[in-house]
Image (tube, coloured by chain):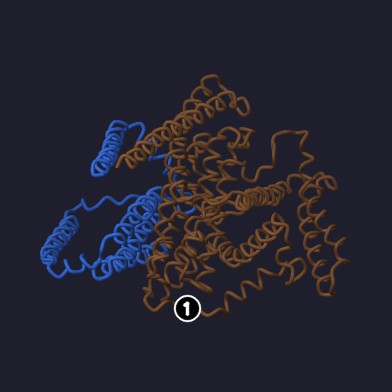
Amino acid sequence: MLDKVIFYFFAGIAVGSAALMVTRRNAVHSAIFLIATLLATAGIFLQLRAEFIFIVQIILYVGGIMVLFIFVIMLVNLDVALLQIKFARQKWVALVVTLALTAQVGLLFWTTGKMPGQGFPILTAAPVNRLPPNAEAVAKSLFSSYLLPFEIASVLLLVAMIGAVVMAKKRT
Amino acid sequence: MQAATQATLDFLKLYWAPLLCGVVIVAVLPLIVGYIVLVERKLMADMQARLGPMRVGPHGLLQPIADAVKLLIKEDIIPDDADKLVFWLAPVFSVGAALLAIAGLAFGPAFQIAQDLNIGILFVVGISALGIFGIVLGGWASNSHYSLMGALRSSAQLVSYETAAGMALVCGLLFAGTLNIKSIVAAQGTQGVWFGFLAPVAFFTYLVASIAETNRAPFDLPEAESELVAGYMTEFSGFRWSLYFLAEYTNMIVVASVATTLFLGGWLRPFANVRWLNFLDYLPPLLMMGIAGYCVLRMPKQPTRVQQMFMLAVAGLCLVVAMVLAAPVLLPFVKPSLKEAVAPFYAGIHGGFWFIFKVSAYLYFFMWLRFTIPRYRFDQLMRLGWHFLIPLSIINVLVVGVALIVGSYFNLQGWALLLATTPAAIVALVAALAILSIDQKKQARQAGTAATDFYAG
């Protein structure tokens, strides 16, 4: 019961502020509502006892990416952006894509519910008072079973970072 | 409706203790912050050969309360062109992040709000980093150039020094092998040596980065009065301004607590494993007794009756604290059978004392620096961060990793581990200084060519 209340609380905040984020005119207000959405999603992760994912979500998305977003929003000339909104045709394309996606997800839920003995796998939740050590679990799987993909990903990130530096240097 | 009340009751039954602790922290923290400010002002006055606040209460001891009342009844001004919602939200965001970060900290083995958090230190660092939104949004919402410039500077500074601080923390965590705060302190207990000794370079890096992260002098660029009025706080007044202030000082407590936990042995007594130093257990009660005695001695010197009574009250308070601290040490002598029963109380009370003591020492060091070192220029600050601290901390992580492998190969434990980590620290320092000198040489050459170009043109 408690879990349900907490889930609907966070899910409500996430969905509500996502809607507000799309509809706000002011880019900074949109960014604030996006932060609220991301924080509420982090709350849902925490409620699923995935505390490591919770803090990674907060550090990376809220503390890293959103700070960058807000920086860019502040530095870019917003009047130009507001003018461009008038000529945007993306709205209708976005609406169609969203409807298609919604239909797809709905169909998925409907069909899995219909199939006998199938449906979505439901994992047993960890007990409330004792959380599993998830930082250790993530580290173990990253550095033992998935070492090669992990290293490839980190090399890719390094290349991207150096590439960004090189491109920034060339311009000056 | 029934279900909702049932859920609320369940929630309260499970979490009444953390909730109570949280309420206590939120209620008491402004008072503590007020007294930290008073100590800072007194210290500043002492270093500048003045008296500092003396009017309200004996030696200005009631000054924080007077200040708080003044801030509360001040007119609340919102600029006409400000973005009202964001202007309202920004200080709240700052304070909220700072207070939430406290929830992950453990002030002694008994007092932690989020009990046994597995991601411990990551939670504290990650949440307290959110305070940057309060600064950026506050600066933007004020719709003033000074505020915006202050906010941009401040966030640039926070982002660049967070990297160095994070790398320094990684270094300390390599020794601990866990993120859980209680386990980190326990690891220092079993090793018998604080990680500050094992990783001196990381401790130094964290010290500098934490000063920069809390926007304190000599890195208080965002609030450089002579250049930017008051940085992102320019348009804020009264209670909103005091919220920013509260957030800043809370952040100081948070970084000091993180450094204490990871590098200064947390709530462990100095040399907790050395038997013949057990007499140190008598130090905390004796210290409190000493303060109480001093207050009683100074009592007749006070000018008015009220101030004399106040002095006596302070002495009484110190005496009570001394009794509480002495009880778990002295009770086993009176009744040896009580030793087992008293042990958790001893750990909780004395642990709390040592933790608060170390945090206060760290904060004292902050203040000391503030009144000693002049402010950096912004480009100097950025160069120090990017060209010295970040390379230093990255090299240090690599070298300490190697030292740990060497240490485990020779099976070094505790103080013997210093044999491996000290050369590592020296290597890291030399490498970072070499990078800095090469960089400076290059810049000098560039400056030289630029100058000649200028004269040629």
Nearer to us in this view, B215 or B333: B215
Image height of B327 relative to B96, above or below = above
Q: Is residue A60 left or right of residue B101?
A: left
Instruction: Name the colour assigned to chain B in the rendering.
Output: brown
Task: Say which amino acid is labelled 1.
Answer: Ile
Instruction: Name the colour assigned to chain A in the rendering.
Output: blue
Nearer to us in this view, B265 or B4: B265
Residue B40 picture quarter: bottom right
Q: Is residue B283 visible?
A: yes
Q: How many marks?
A: 1
Image height of A83 relative to A112, above or below = below
Image height of B141 relative to B272, above or below = below
Q: Is residue A108 left or right of residue B90?
A: left
Residue B414 picture quarter: top right
Q: Looking at the figure, which quarter contains the C terminus of chain B?
A: top left
Which residue is painted at 53% across and 80% down in the image? B75
Q: Position of residue B290 (x, y in %)?
A: 82, 53
Which residue is painted at 32% across and 32% down in the image? A147
Residue B134 picture quarter: bottom left
Q: Position of residue A22 (x, y in %)?
A: 24, 67
Residue at the disc numbered 1: B77
Q: Residue extending furthest top?
A: B410
Q: Secondary structure at mark 1?
A: loop
Q: Position of residue A76 (x, y in %)?
A: 27, 60
> What chain letter is assigned to the residue under label 1?
B
For label 1, the crowd category at 10 Å Cα-Cα, with few meaning under 14, some 14 to 19 and many 20 or more, is few
Q: Is residue B108 visible?
A: no
Q: Residue extending furthest front?
A: B456
Nearer to us in this view, B124 or B252: B252
Q: Position of residue A172 (x, y in %)?
A: 26, 44
